[in-house]
Amino acid sequence: MIDLRSDTVTRPGRAMLEAMMTAPVGDDVYGDDPTVNELQRYAAELGGKEAALFLPTGTQANLVALLSHCERGEEYIVGQVAHNYLYEAGGAAVLGSIQPQPIDAAPDGTLPLDKVAAKIKADDIHFARTRLLSLENTHNGKVLPREYLKQAWEFTRERGLSLHVDGARIFNAVVDYGCELREVTQYCDSFTICLSKGLGTPVGSLLVGSADYIKRATRWRKMAGGGMRQAGILAAAGLYALKNNVQRLQQDHDNAAWMATQLREMGVDVMRHDTNMLFVRVGDTHAAALGEFMRERGVLINAAPALRLVTHLDVSREQLAQVVSHWQAFLQR
Ligand SMILES: *Cc1c(COP(=O)(O)O)cnc(C)c1O
């Protein structure tokens, strides 16, 4: 199957599996797993921070991140369609008694700082205490402007807020900027990395920040049930991914751009393409039929009127060329 639904569908290749099979392991709840420790050390170094924590999922990494920034009765300002507001089942509110203050993102994926400022609450017994600004980079494939990261950092310093970046796909942004991770993450207090999307591991995310912060996060992770034992098997995949699968994300971006061009030339309404994602309008009448047509030909897509196609390390340019020709056949049927 050619699976364009998400970059989460990637499977570990032979070299990654080899690294997993030969990884030295220990009990990570005791802090004894050398491979987890090495992954955490390496991620902290890449991000220019003191410490990092390995977690099973990006959702748990964001939850633990929020719990470690905000106390009960405090709030975070976040995008209306940010993952850690909209797509995490309300975890921060349910499990942390942390109030979200969502605002609309600008078309470029940023949260305009004047709009953020307008939502920061005064010190008044009627209000929750505003503690944190949470950004997402990339946001639906969009790379936040580099200048904005610095502005958001300076803004939060002036306003006494912490700054968290949900960096599930931060390496897609880093590859697009053509810089080192730490040049980007110097402008936040904490950030997450998802290892199981375009980086290609079966499982795993990282939360990165100061030593004190990660110490608090480690307790929250335990409470959330994320303290794993011989997790080095999984961490080995993460180390492999960070060392081998970052620069190749450029191929996914090039493939998405190529696909956008091909589809546009066929008259398909490609609304936008950013990094490894394309957004295509197929309309209400064709969505289900296109999904079925593709499925019969071994291609999986999210069959929706406005659908997202995602490129990743398990789809080659040749396979995308097949998808394009199937699409052509669909239009001519
Ligand atoms: C995928 C994703 C996450 C975490 O997802 P998990 O499936 O729990 O690993 C968090 N934030 C963003 C922006 C994501 O795209």
Image: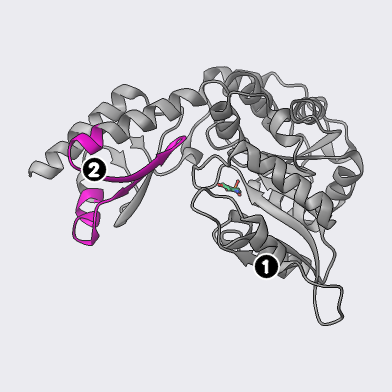
Amino acid type at image mark 1: Gln
* Quarter of the view holding residue 98: bottom right
Residue at 59 percent across and 50 percent down: it is 110
Residue at 79 percent across and 29 percent down: it is 48
Quadrant where the N terminus lies?
top left
Which one is nearer the viewer's eye here, 109 or 283? 109
Say whether residue 274 is magenta: yes
Q: Is residue 301 left or right of residue 55?
A: left
Mark 2 or mark 1: name the one nearer the start of the chain: 1
Q: Is residue 256 visible?
A: yes
Which one is nearer the viewer's eye here, 62 or 277? 277
Q: Which residue is mark 2?
A: 294
Q: Is residue 290 left or right of residue 332?
A: right
Give coordinates of residue 139: x percent, y percent. 54, 47
Q: Is residue 25 left or right of residue 2?
A: right
Which one is nearer the viewer's eye here, 113 or 178? 113
Q: Which residue is mark 1?
A: 101
- Badge 2, how many Cα within 10 Å: few under 14, some, many 20+? some
